[in-house]
Structure formats: structure tokens, C-alpha cells
């Protein structure tokens, strides 16, 4: 068995949290490929960023095939699932709960989170809804929204919860 590590952000750039369901989708799909034994997220202690660690059998699948497959699966996930990150005005817990509940009822919304400090995070299936539909509902509840960009470093600096030790491998 060999291992390789890939940066997570280029594979699924919309994802700002390594605990996002899209990361789980990615690792599940990778593990389903013949020749790939294990796929998990590990923390690069030198940079503080999350990395995708893939354990594979080089007699069944080449390193090049593993990398190409990971890129293709990541692109398919990114094409299908969207992430809307916004900031609205601070509010009471009950109002944030009401907004979260309303967003969760939109067909195609897989997960919605609204905190009292105004942070809004929505994961959705692009085949069932659009970011515009979600924005419309959000506009009913808030006078202004500010887009929160996802950045290459956004998946970085998880305080804990990384997978079993997997170190840099070519």
C-alpha cells in the first residue's frame, strides 16, 4: 500500500470547513474506486491546513490515476453542490433560529446554519435550487447581506479532529 497527500482546497474550492458533507462525499467516492483502500483528511502540522490522504495499491491503480480521479470527483462534487456564505446583521437567538428554519425548508437545501452574530452558511444541491433562490429568502429576513468569500486558507487551521497520522508522501 502506498499513500499520497493532496491539497483539499483545489479539489473542492467552495468548501470552507473540512467537516463539510462534501468532504465526506469526496472521501466516500474515492474509497469506492478499485485500488483505493482508504481516504481521509489529515492536518499538515507545518502549515495548519487540511490535506486529503489517499492510501492506494500501486499494483491496481497508479499515482497518476489516483490524482486524476480525485480531481474529477472533486469537480463533480463542486458542480453539483453549492455553498452560500453570508453575513447579515446580528440578531437574537430566536430570530436566527427562525431564519435557519426557513432556509432549511427550501427544496434542495441540505444544511442551513444561521448564528446570532449574523453568520449564514447554506449547503445546497444545485440540481434542486439556486443560490439566487436562497438569497431571495434571505432578503425577506435581512435588509443587507455581505458575501463571505471562501479562500484557500479557509479549510485551514482546524483546532482538532484530524484523521490518523498521515504525513507527507509523494
Image (cartoon, grey):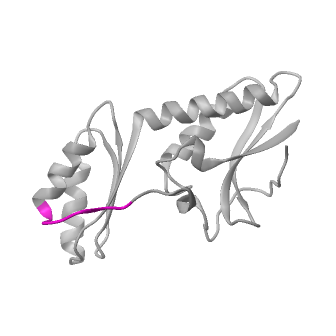
Q: Is residue 105 visible?
A: no
Residue 96 percent across, percent down from the top left: 23, 69
Q: Is residue 35 positioned above or below 50 on the image?
A: above
- Magenta run includes residue 122: no
Which residue lies at the image location 54% right of the left edge and 39% below the top edge?
25
**Most foreground residue, 20 or 82:** 82
Q: Which residues are magenta?
A: 141-148
| Quadrant in the rendering for residue 85 | bottom left
Q: Residue 146 at what x, y percent from top left?
A: 27, 64
Q: Depth check: give the residue in front, 159 or 153.
A: 153
Give the image quarter of residue 102: bottom left
| Residue 64 or residue 104, whichever sits in front | 64
Question: Where is residue 32 drawn, in percent x and y?
Answer: 66, 28
Residue at 76 percent across and 67 percent down: it is 46
Left or right of 129: which side holds 67? right
Q: Quadrant of residue 57?
A: top right
Q: Is residue 55 above or below residue 159?
A: above
The C terminus is located in which quarter?
top right
Residue 41 visible in the current orientation: yes
Q: Where does the image place residue 61, in percent across and percent down from the top left?
A: 80, 23
Q: Identify the residue at image location x=88%, y=35%.
A: 1
Overall secondary structure of the magenta section: loop
Q: How many numbered discs, if any?
A: 0
Residue at image position (45%, 56%) is 150
Considering only vertical position in the picture, is 80 above or below 40?
Answer: above
Amino acid at each position: 500500500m502506498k499513500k499520497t497527500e493532496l491539497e483539499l482546497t483545489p479539489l473542492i474550492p467552495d468548501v470552507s470547513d473540512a467537516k463539510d458533507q462534501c468532504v465526506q462525499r469526496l472521501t466516500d467516492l474515492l474509497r469506492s474506486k478499485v485500488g483505493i483502500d482508504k481516504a481521509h483528511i489529515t492536518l499538515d502540522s507545518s502549515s495548519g491546513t487540511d490535506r486529503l490522504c489517499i492510501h492506494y495499491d500501486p499494483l491496481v491503480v497508479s499515482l497518476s490515476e489516483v490524482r486524476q480521479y480525485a480531481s474529477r470527483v472533486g469537480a463533480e462534487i463542486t458542480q453539483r453542490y453549492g455553498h452560500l456564505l453570508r453575513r447579515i446583521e446580528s440578531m437574537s437567538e430566536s430570530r436566527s433560529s427562525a431564519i435557519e428554519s426557513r432556509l432549511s425548508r427550501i427544496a434542495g437545501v441540505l444544511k442551513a446554519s444561521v448564528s446570532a452574530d449574523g453568520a449564514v452558511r447554506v449547503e445546497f444541491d444545485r440540481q434542486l435550487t439556486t443560490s439566487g433562490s436562497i438569497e431571495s429568502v434571505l432578503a425577506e429576513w435581512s435588509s443587507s447581506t455581505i458575501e463571505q468569500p471562501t479562500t484557500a486558507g479557509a479549510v485551514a487551521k482546524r483546532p482538532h479532529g484530524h484523521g490518523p497520522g498521515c504525513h507527507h508522501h509523494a
